[in-house]
Amino acid sequence: MTSKVTSFDIATTPSPYKYPNFTELASAIGLVTETHEVTSEDGYVLTLFNIPGNKSRPILIMHGIMDNADTFILRGNGSLGYTLAKEGYDVWFGNFRGNRYNRRHATLDPIEAEFWNFTYHEIGYYDLPAIIDYILNKTEQTQLSAIGFSLGTTIFYVLGSTRPEYNTKIKILICLAPIAYFKHVEPPVSTLIGMAPYISFITQDMPELKVDKSNFLATCQSPASVEACRQFLFSFAGADDEEIELDFFRTFHDTSASVSRKLAIHMAKSRKVFAQYDFGSQRNLQVYNSAVPPQYNLSACVMKMALFVGKNDKLSVIKDVELLRDQLPNVVEYRVVDRDLCNHFDFVWGRNMHVYLLPYVLDTLEKYS
């Protein structure tokens, strides 16, 4: 091991209910940021944050579901974003359409149902190309490196299989807690996925699914209930009391975000196959000329990839990641994090990432980019 990462300070704010934005969080840990905007081919205005560095070393980081770019700097100087910046990378943080930074469109308003008519397919097919091309243009490079977390990995599989010309624009994709299949998940995750048809029916008039942030944060920051909040989240992600400590939830900022109902249903239907959105047989015939949606051609994803998985991750289960790995043609590294309790959140919020994860991420980047 040649790379070293130091310990952390949590980025905090005086009032837990005054939600700082990305720029404020970054400034609190001594990082200078720039804000950029790019419009996707289908009209979504996308906000990018950049921590300027060596323009010959651009790297794009994409977050997971119901989240935003803030998640990569919440752990202060022990976070992934801070670490990459201090290593001299030109760090770019993307945001999914619909989150707190991306609620604009050329013609649509977020209060309109059509604004939320998208899944992770559109994020991978429209948003990622726009983001990548913008970064390459700004840095005057022909390639960049990328890191995805959770659903932030899924969109790259969509990109590589549907727009294969972008494979050559990515030097290396590091996948933290990769998501494509949910074949081997257990309750309560499998229970929730099994309820997808019923959830789809009862939410059919709710194109935007969102968390009541004020109540959620009040619960997570109340001394009387913060442990219940933590255990609830652990039931879906895997328990790790050592890495996600109670104090972290008391400084838990406004990282939660809205998500399109269609995207959530799409994820739930990925239990056994990694395929495009299932509209139902009749509508599928109109859209795909087939009664079933086409599966993503993972063999077309020829970009170099490194997969990192946790032993205790209840969402990105090792057996499902192995299934994904065996279908990807250019996996150059596959690493099970050497920590028995490593759960889904530990890849972005673990307080000791600088020990068990980030040195290996840096070494992989150095090796392949």
Image: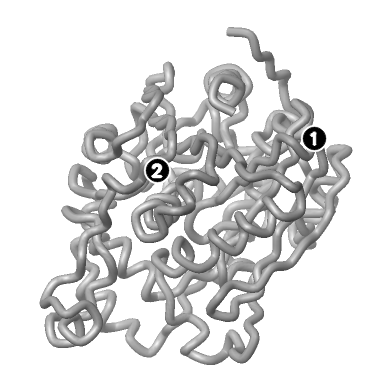
At a point 40% along the width and 24% down the height, the residue shown is 333
Question: Dot 2 surroundings within 10 Å: few (below 14), some, or many (20 or more)?
Answer: many
Give the labeled residue for mark 2: 237
At a point 41% along the width and 59% down the height, the residue shown is 163
Q: Secondary structure at mark 1?
A: strand
How far apart in space, not on screen, are marks 2 and 1 (Cα)?
35 Å
Question: Front-most of 191 and 182?
Answer: 182
Query: Which quarter of the figure has residue 313?
Result: top left
Query: Which quarter of the figure has residue 129?
Result: bottom right
Looking at the rendered image, the quarter that the C terminus falls into is top right
Of badges 2 and 1, the one in the foreground is 1
Q: Is residue 13 above or below residue 241?
A: below
Please state the horizontal and vertical placement of residue 37, each as a whole percent of the image: 73, 67
At a point 72% along the width and 21% down the height, the residue shown is 7
At a point 70% along the width and 32% down the height, the residue shown is 84
Q: Mark 2 belongs to which amino acid?
A: Ala
Left or right, 369 with reference to 197: right
Looking at the rendered image, the quarter that the N terminus falls into is top right
Q: Is residue 74 visible?
A: no
Question: Front-most of 147 and 13?
Answer: 147
User: Most extreme residue toward the top, as rendered?
Assistant: 1
Q: Which mark is residue 176?
A: none
Q: Mark 1 belongs to which amino acid?
A: Asn
Q: Secondary structure at mark 2?
A: helix
Question: Front-most of 240 and 84?
Answer: 84
Q: Is residue 276 above or below residue 149?
A: below
Query: Which quarter of the figure has residue 299?
Result: top left
Give the labeled residue for mark 1: 54
Mark found first going from the N terminus, 2 or 1: 1
Please state the horizontal and vertical placement of residue 253, each as a whole percent of the image: 68, 54
